[in-house]
Image: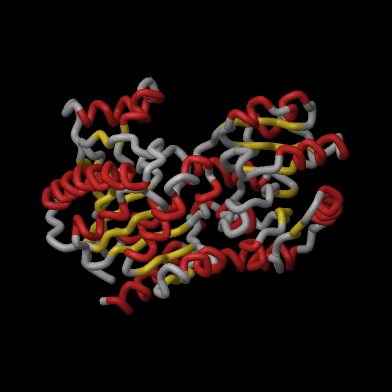
Amino acid sequence: MTNQNIIILAQQNWDTPIGTNPRNMALEFARHNRVLYVNMPLDVNTVLRERREPGVRQRLRVLLGQEPGLVSVAPNVWVCTTRVLLLSANWLASRAAFGALNRLNAKWLAHDIRRAARAVGFDSFYLLQDGLIYPGVELKRQLRPRQFIYNLRDYVLAVPYFRRHGPWLEAATMATADLVTANSAWLRDYARPHNPRSYDIGQGCVLSQYQADTNHPLPADLAAVPGPRLTYTGYLTAIRLDIGLLLHIARQRPTWHLVLIGPEDEAFQRSELHGLPNVHFLGSKAPAELAAYLQHSHVCINPQTLNDITVGNYPLKIDEYLAMGQPVVATATGAMTMFAEHVYLASGLAEWLIQLETALADHDPARRAARIAFTQTHTWEASVGRLYRAVAEGD
């Protein structure tokens, strides 16, 4: 695909501080096409609960006309912050009542997207919805894109928010879409009963930020942590990560030091991990800083809890770890089977300790080189190229 117009509606806003899949996908699209990236619209409940949050306050200023809602952020990329306030409908138990409000929200959202599309000269366009966004089920009918693509990266129906209306809405969205793209074979197979045009397009990684042969200075806060360092990078949330497993590792191996980098949810903030001398919370880091922390670690870890959310989830951090050549230990999930040749997979507490011992002793240059080579196929160019080929089948 070249010289086309693409609108992306994503769960994650453009200015999300950590790296995000839809933003990276948008930048790859923009190499040969034009992209309008639509931030998640505000809803009444979010304004009431989070009105003091900087991101919500900025979107309120746009809503009130105090800041522009359409800005150019990169070559061929515009970001639209909509001037609509959606009605919060998820609390409604009645599907009919919810559906009526959802259609009204979609009408308002579509009107604002059309306004932004006209402003940047999009006469016709492809529409990609990244993740389950309730009004999205109506947008194909409202906006009439050339093709409506539903991009599936997580099994979100296990998240409490989505349990009431998520199952029927996601099924309807997948059935309505012209095609469904997924970043793992597990999610592709989940989508196929709803839409035969479901494709595994893999996952991209910004490999330019993870160059193993570049010498990165040892960060000061990591220098204060003795070795061996077992490092995790990413959002620290009990929905995905096994706090009990981390406690077990730290207590059973007091000479090992767990380095946890990223923002914490409430469960992590309250956990006993904060009271252990060999567990180190280093806070959030910019994506460009992470390579230095990985390079000066001894093993990288992904201690996921096994549940409906994680079983088919593609763990992007594994590519980042492997790109730096580091030994990796991760929970064995369905999506992790593709990494089995290069990652030490563990099931259960005892096996985690065994695999960590093995990884700490892994100093084989050939295995390191193989890990780095493996990640070179996981680029955004390759992933988006698969999406283009899937789209072309429907044009």
Provide residue 240's location: percent of width, then percent of height: 62, 45
Which quarter of the rendered picture does the N terminus lie within? bottom left
Answer left or right for 91 relative to 59.
right
* Quadrant of res 86: top left
- Residue 213 in sight: no
Residue furthest top as drawn: 52
Provide residue 335's location: percent of width, then percent of height: 61, 62
Provide residue 49's location: percent of width, then percent of height: 40, 24
Residue at image coords 78%, 36% = 247
Residue at image coords 48%, 69% = 200
Which of the pair 42/56 is nearer the observer?
42
* Quadrant of res 8: bottom left
Please, is residue 187 above or below residue 304 in the view?
A: below
Please, is residue 33 above or below residue 14 in the view?
A: below
Residue at image coords 40%, 66% = 180
Please, is residue 196 above or below residue 134 in the view?
A: below
Which of the pair 99/37 is nearer the observer?
99
Which quarter of the rendered picture does the C terminus lie within? bottom left
Please, is residue 169 above or below residue 292 in the view?
A: below
- Residue 289 in sight: yes
Q: Say how the picture is coloured.
A: secondary structure
Q: How many numbered badges does the structure rendering display? A: 0
Provide residue 116's location: percent of width, then percent of height: 17, 47
Which of the pair 206/199 is nearer the observer?
199
Residue at image coords 12%, 60% = 123
Answer left or right for 299 relative to 197.
right
